[in-house]
């Protein structure tokens, strides 16, 4: 075999190898990326954690099921509820979870224990504001859920306490769910024996209300 023919054969082999490699790489690049739904972090207290019921019945798990059935099959809802938590622990909870993964949306449901314990309105508002500023600086969407204080504190404190949430929602331009337990609070058949925590049926109502809020952000806003 002549030198020239050997050289041509070598070039042909190399060219074929290069073309095959290029096609393989192109095919690999062309593979569809896994679909991702919004990652929703639920920060709250025992009302979020699901005190007294199975975790699958708490509103974060039920919300995820509703989102999957409602056309958002890749949505992830993370339960970051801590029994007994007040607004004071919110910022630390956010930092802990944000270090591990940045959510697309935070359902921020803290403040109920502040109202139960009679913590000053100014202190609660200050802590909630710090958390909202942190979330805004991170560029995530927020649903702030309103809370109510028990009536045994008189008229002034419950009224001033309830006013914190719409005031902050307006100031920081975040979505507001006026009351986390709307349609559930005070309904004996939707609450456990303590009259505070929802039962499974109550959490279905809460999850539906939150589902409607999430739809406003991810579905209705683009239609």
Image (cartoon, rainbow, N blue to C red):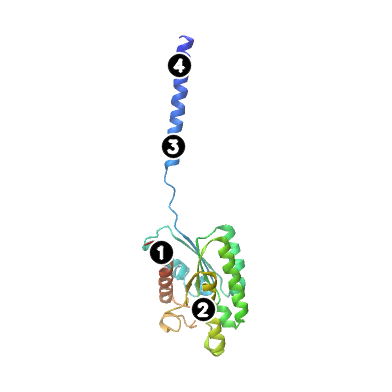
Residue under pointer 4: 8
Horizontal and vertical percent position of residue 122 = 62, 79
Residue under pointer 3: 26
Q: Quadrant of residue 121?
A: bottom right
- Does residue 172 sit above or below 38 in this rendering? below
Q: Is residue 217 left or right of residue 127?
A: left
Image quarter hosting the C terminus: bottom left
Between marks 1 and 3 in the image, the one whose residue lies nearer the viewer: 1
Callout 4 touching callout 3 (CB < 8 Å): no
Could you give the CA–CA distance between mark 4 and mark 2, rounded to whole angstroms? 80 Å
**Regarding mark 3 in the picture, which secondary structure is present there?**
helix
Residue found 46% across the figure and 36% down from its top:
25
Callout 1 touching callout 3 (CB < 8 Å): no
Horizontal and vertical percent position of residue 178 = 47, 77
10 Å neighbourhood of mark 4: few (<14), some, or many (≥20)?
A: few
Residue under pointer 2: 147
Count of numbered circles on the image: 4
Callout 1 touching callout 2 (CB < 8 Å): no
Could you give the CA–CA distance between mark 1 and mark 3, rounded to whole angstroms? 36 Å
Residue found 44% across the figure and 60% down from its top:
75
Callout 1 touching callout 4 (CB < 8 Å): no
10 Å neighbourhood of mark 2: few (<14), some, or many (≥20)?
A: many
**Regarding mark 1 in the picture, which secondary structure is present there?**
helix
- Does residue 34 sit above or below 1 in this rendering? below
Question: Which numbered disc, 4 or 3, marks the residue that appears first in the sequence?
Answer: 4
Image quarter hosting the N terminus: top left
Residue under pointer 1: 221
10 Å neighbourhood of mark 1: few (<14), some, or many (≥20)?
A: few
């Amino acid at each position: 075999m002549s030198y020239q023919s050997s050289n041509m054969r070598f070039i042909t082999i190399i060219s074929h190898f290069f073309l095959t490699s290029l096609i393989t790489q192109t095919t690999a690049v062309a593979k569809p990326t896994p679909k991702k739904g919004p990652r929703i972090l639920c920060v709250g207290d025992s009302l979020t954690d699901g005190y007294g019921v199975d975790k699958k019945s708490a509103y974060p798990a039920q919300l995820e099921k509703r989102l999957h059935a409602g056309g958002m099959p890749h949505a992830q809802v993370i339960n970051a509820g801590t029994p007994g938590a007040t607004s004071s622990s919110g910022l630390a909870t956010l930092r802990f979870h944000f270090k591990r993964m940045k959510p697309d949306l935070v359902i921020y449901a803290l403040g109920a224990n502040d109202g139960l314990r009679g913590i000053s309105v100014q202190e609660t508002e200050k802590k909630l504001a710090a958390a909202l500023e942190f979330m805004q600086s991170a560029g995530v969407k927020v649903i702030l859920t309103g809370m109510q204080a028990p009536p045994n504190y008189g008229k002034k404190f419950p009224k001033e306490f309830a006013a914190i949430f719409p005031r902050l929602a307006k100031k920081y331009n975040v979505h507001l769910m006026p009351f986390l337990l709307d349609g559930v609070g005070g309904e004996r058949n939707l609450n456990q024996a303590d009259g505070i925590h929802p039962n499974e049926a109550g959490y279905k109502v809460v999850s539906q209300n939150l589902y409607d809020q999430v739809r406003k952000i991810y579905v209705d806003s683009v239609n």
